[in-house]
Amino acid sequence: QVQLVESGGGLVQAGGSLRLSCAASGRTFSSYAMGWFRQAPGNERQFVAAITRSRGSLYYADSVRGRFTISRDNAKNTVSLQMNSLKPEDTAVYYCAAALVSGSLTLRSTYQYWGQGTQVTVSS
């Protein structure tokens, strides 16, 4: 089992940057594929980015590709999301998630563990 805690959210102006971090407990972090999702008020939770166990593959939603970068440090049990050129439509609660079993990393159902989320607000 793994516990996830996100940090780094906040208020930023459009065009600015934020870096989200997710700290994972446990000694098997490298066994999990990791993902970031986001949920805006009134919307479903949507896929943002994912990274495989070995960092061999990265996945991005079309809406963030070229602006966001996901990375992980297996030695520090952390996964990060660097967000640049932020837009008001990026405003949402951002969630970190961990997947132990195989499956499409763009689907919520693939992930077994979720953090509590961190708020990102982008002002225009």
Image: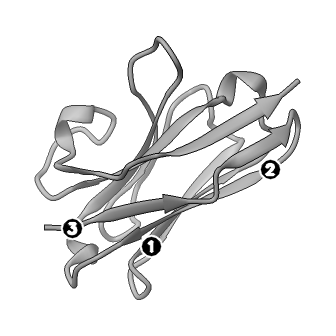
Considering the image in quadrants, where does the C terminus appear? top right
- Whichever of callouts 2 and 3 sits on the residue coming sooner in the sequence is 3
Q: CA distance from mark 3 to mark 1?
A: 12 Å
Q: CA distance from mark 2 to mark 3?
A: 28 Å
Which amino acid type is shown beneath numbered disc 3?
A: Val
The residue where tag 2 is placed is 17
The residue where tag 1 is placed is 78
Q: CA distance from mark 2 to mark 1?
A: 19 Å
Which amino acid type is shown beneath numbered disc 2?
A: Ser
Determine whether the residue tagged by mark 3 lies in a helix, strand or loop.
loop
Determine whether the residue tagged by mark 1 lies in a helix, strand or loop.
strand
The residue where tag 3 is placed is 2
- Whichever of callouts 3 and 1 sits on the residue coming sooner in the sequence is 3
Which residue sits at x=18%, y=34%?
109
Q: Residues within 10 Å of mark 2 (few under 14, many from 20)?
A: some
Which residue sits at x=26%, y=65%?
3
Q: Residues within 10 Å of mark 3 (few under 14, many from 20)?
A: some
Which amino acid type is shown beneath numbered disc 1?
A: Thr
Determine whether the residue tagged by mark 2 lies in a helix, strand or loop.
loop
Which residue sits at x=65%, y=46%?
68
